[in-house]
Image: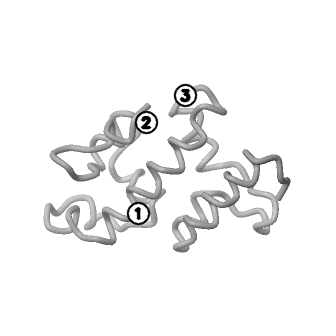
Amino acid sequence: MSIAQYADQGLFSPRKFAEALRTTSDEIARTAGLGKDAIQRKDRIRSDKTQRRLREVAEIINKVEPRFGSALMAYAWYRSEPLHGFSGLTAMQLVRDGRAGDVLEYIDAIDAGVHA
Protein backbone atom coordinates (compact mmCIF):
# COMPACT_ATOMS: atom_id res chain seq x y z
CA MET A 1 0.00 0.00 0.00
CA SER A 2 0.95 3.62 -0.29
CA ILE A 3 2.17 5.88 2.47
CA ALA A 4 -0.69 8.18 1.41
CA GLN A 5 -3.18 5.78 3.02
CA TYR A 6 -1.98 7.10 6.40
CA ALA A 7 -2.41 10.77 5.47
CA ASP A 8 -5.25 13.23 5.69
CA GLN A 9 -4.99 16.68 4.10
CA GLY A 10 -1.22 16.43 3.71
CA LEU A 11 -0.46 15.27 7.27
CA PHE A 12 0.01 11.83 8.75
CA SER A 13 -3.16 11.06 10.68
CA PRO A 14 -3.27 8.79 13.74
CA ARG A 15 -6.90 8.06 12.85
CA LYS A 16 -5.93 6.89 9.34
CA PHE A 17 -3.20 4.68 10.81
CA ALA A 18 -5.71 3.19 13.25
CA GLU A 19 -8.24 2.50 10.47
CA ALA A 20 -5.68 0.91 8.15
CA LEU A 21 -4.10 -1.21 10.89
CA ARG A 22 -7.34 -2.07 12.72
CA THR A 23 -6.31 -0.63 16.04
CA THR A 24 -6.84 2.55 18.05
CA SER A 25 -5.22 5.95 17.76
CA ASP A 26 -3.93 5.51 21.32
CA GLU A 27 -2.16 2.32 20.27
CA ILE A 28 -0.64 4.06 17.26
CA ALA A 29 0.67 6.79 19.54
CA ARG A 30 2.17 4.21 21.89
CA THR A 31 3.86 2.27 19.08
CA ALA A 32 5.34 5.49 17.70
CA GLY A 33 6.60 6.61 21.10
CA LEU A 34 4.13 9.48 21.40
CA GLY A 35 1.90 10.54 24.27
CA LYS A 36 -1.88 10.65 24.05
CA ASP A 37 -1.71 14.43 23.88
CA ALA A 38 0.26 14.21 20.63
CA ILE A 39 -2.62 12.51 18.86
CA GLN A 40 -5.58 14.22 20.50
CA ARG A 41 -4.75 17.91 20.04
CA LYS A 42 -4.72 19.25 16.48
CA ASP A 43 -1.74 21.51 17.13
CA ARG A 44 0.25 18.56 18.50
CA ILE A 45 -0.70 16.31 15.56
CA ARG A 46 0.83 18.96 13.29
CA SER A 47 4.06 19.19 15.32
CA ASP A 48 7.34 18.16 13.70
CA LYS A 49 7.98 15.43 16.26
CA THR A 50 4.56 13.82 15.86
CA GLN A 51 4.68 13.94 12.08
CA ARG A 52 8.26 12.60 12.02
CA ARG A 53 7.41 9.64 14.25
CA LEU A 54 4.28 8.79 12.26
CA ARG A 55 6.26 9.04 9.01
CA GLU A 56 8.92 6.71 10.40
CA VAL A 57 6.31 4.12 11.35
CA ALA A 58 4.69 4.41 7.90
CA GLU A 59 8.06 4.03 6.13
CA ILE A 60 8.98 0.94 8.11
CA ILE A 61 5.61 -0.75 7.66
CA ASN A 62 5.56 0.03 3.94
CA LYS A 63 9.11 -1.23 3.52
CA VAL A 64 8.37 -4.65 5.06
CA GLU A 65 4.77 -5.05 3.89
CA PRO A 66 5.71 -6.89 0.65
CA ARG A 67 7.67 -9.41 2.73
CA PHE A 68 4.67 -10.19 4.95
CA GLY A 69 1.84 -9.79 2.45
CA SER A 70 -0.21 -7.20 4.31
CA ALA A 71 0.08 -4.04 6.35
CA LEU A 72 -1.47 -5.86 9.32
CA MET A 73 1.22 -8.55 9.29
CA ALA A 74 3.93 -5.91 8.82
CA TYR A 75 2.54 -4.01 11.81
CA ALA A 76 2.55 -7.20 13.89
CA TRP A 77 6.22 -7.72 12.94
CA TYR A 78 6.99 -4.08 13.81
CA ARG A 79 5.49 -4.49 17.27
CA SER A 80 6.66 -7.94 18.27
CA GLU A 81 9.61 -9.40 16.37
CA PRO A 82 13.00 -9.00 18.09
CA LEU A 83 15.65 -7.78 15.65
CA HIS A 84 18.98 -9.59 15.54
CA GLY A 85 21.86 -7.37 16.53
CA PHE A 86 19.74 -5.04 18.66
CA SER A 87 19.76 -6.94 21.97
CA GLY A 88 16.32 -8.39 21.26
CA LEU A 89 14.61 -5.03 20.80
CA THR A 90 11.73 -4.78 18.34
CA ALA A 91 11.40 -2.21 15.58
CA MET A 92 8.77 -0.49 17.71
CA GLN A 93 11.11 -0.22 20.69
CA LEU A 94 13.87 1.19 18.51
CA VAL A 95 11.54 3.78 16.94
CA ARG A 96 10.32 4.80 20.40
CA ASP A 97 13.98 5.33 21.33
CA GLY A 98 14.50 7.58 18.29
CA ARG A 99 16.34 4.91 16.26
CA ALA A 100 14.09 4.53 13.21
CA GLY A 101 17.12 5.04 10.96
CA ASP A 102 18.69 1.92 12.47
CA VAL A 103 15.54 -0.08 11.70
CA LEU A 104 15.48 1.13 8.09
CA GLU A 105 19.17 0.28 7.68
CA TYR A 106 18.54 -3.17 9.18
CA ILE A 107 15.73 -3.81 6.69
CA ASP A 108 17.91 -2.62 3.79
CA ALA A 109 20.74 -4.93 4.95
CA ILE A 110 18.39 -7.92 5.13
CA ASP A 111 16.99 -7.08 1.68
CA ALA A 112 20.56 -6.90 0.33
CA GLY A 113 21.29 -10.35 1.75
CA VAL A 114 23.43 -9.19 4.66
CA HIS A 115 22.44 -10.89 7.89
CA ALA A 116 22.44 -8.57 10.88
Write the residue at 52% across / 73% down.
Answer: 98
Q: CA distance from mark 2 to mark 1?
A: 16 Å
Contact, CB < 8 Å: mark 2 with mark 1? no
Write the residue at 57% across / 66% down.
Answer: 101
Q: Which residue is mark 2?
A: 21
The answer to whether residue 110 is left or right of residue 13 is right
Depth order, front residue of 23/98? 98
For badge 3, the amino acid type reads Ser
Residue 45: give x, y in percent of width and height: 22, 62
Q: Nearer the viewer, mark 2 or mark 1?
A: 1
Residue 22: give x, y in percent of width and height: 41, 33
The answer to whether residue 53 is left or right of residue 109 is left
Write the residue at 45% across / 60% down.
Answer: 32
Residue 105, placed above or below residue 13: below
The 10 Å Cα crowd at callout 2, few under 14, some 14 to 19, many 20 or more, is: some
Residue 33: give x, y in percent of width and height: 45, 66
For badge 2, the amino acid type reads Leu
Q: CA distance from mark 3 to mark 2?
A: 10 Å
The 10 Å Cα crowd at callout 1, few under 14, some 14 to 19, many 20 or more, is: many
Contact, CB < 8 Å: mark 3 with mark 2? no
Write the residue at 66% across / 33% down.
Answer: 67
Q: Which residue is mark 3?
A: 70
The answer to whether residue 46 is left or right of residue 49 is left
Mark 2 or mark 1: name the one nearer the start of the chain. Answer: 2
Q: Which residue is mark 1?
A: 53
For badge 1, the amino acid type reads Arg
Q: CA distance from mark 1 to mark 3?
A: 21 Å
In the rendered image, which quarter contains the C terminus?
bottom right
